[in-house]
Image (cartoon, helix red, strand yellow):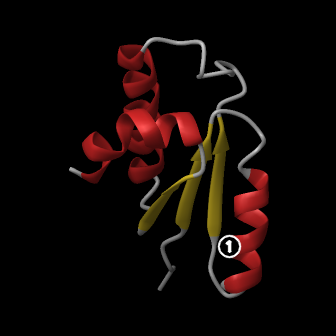
Amino acid sequence: MRTRAIGIFDSGVGGLTVLKEVARLLPSEDILYLGDTARVPYGTRSERTILKYSLKNAAFLLRLGIKLLVVACNTSSAVSLPALQR
């Protein structure tokens, strides 16, 4: 049986430091990383746009069957965390 991965997303590559730490702490876990470099930076966008991008990123990783979502983007966390928790 295949195990489900931990999904991590960031607006770019800064979240790779989070990926590195998760991999260090949980070496037996599979990890999927999504760095949205096509739309970076998020900080200059409207809250509505940031929410839309965050929900799309989460939906993409959820379609891949992740068991846990880590939001490594501070901007996404500040704007979208309540919506992502639902």
Q: Residue furthest front?
A: 78
Q: Quadrant of residue 58?
A: top left
- Image position, residue 71 (x, y; %): 52, 51
Mark count: 1
Q: Quadrant of residue 81?
A: top left
The residue depicted at 64 percent of the width and 18 percent of the height is 39
Up the image or down, 37 lies above or below 39; here it is below
Up the image or down, 86 lies above or below 36; here it is below
Q: Is residue 31 left or right of residue 27?
A: left
Q: Is residue 73 left or right of residue 19?
A: left
Q: Is residue 1 left or right of residue 14?
A: left
Q: Element type at marker 1?
A: helix
Q: Which residue is mark 1?
A: 22
In this rendered view, identify the residue nearer to me: 83 or 27: 83
The residue depicted at 68 percent of the width and 73 percent of the height is 22
In this rendered view, identify the residue nearer to me: 85 or 57: 85
Up the image or down, 46 lies above or below 41; here it is above
- Image position, residue 4 (x, y; %): 48, 73
Q: Residues within 10 Å of mark 1 (few under 14, many from 20)?
A: some
Q: Label 1 is placed on what type of residue? A: Val
- Image position, residue 17 (x, y; %): 78, 58
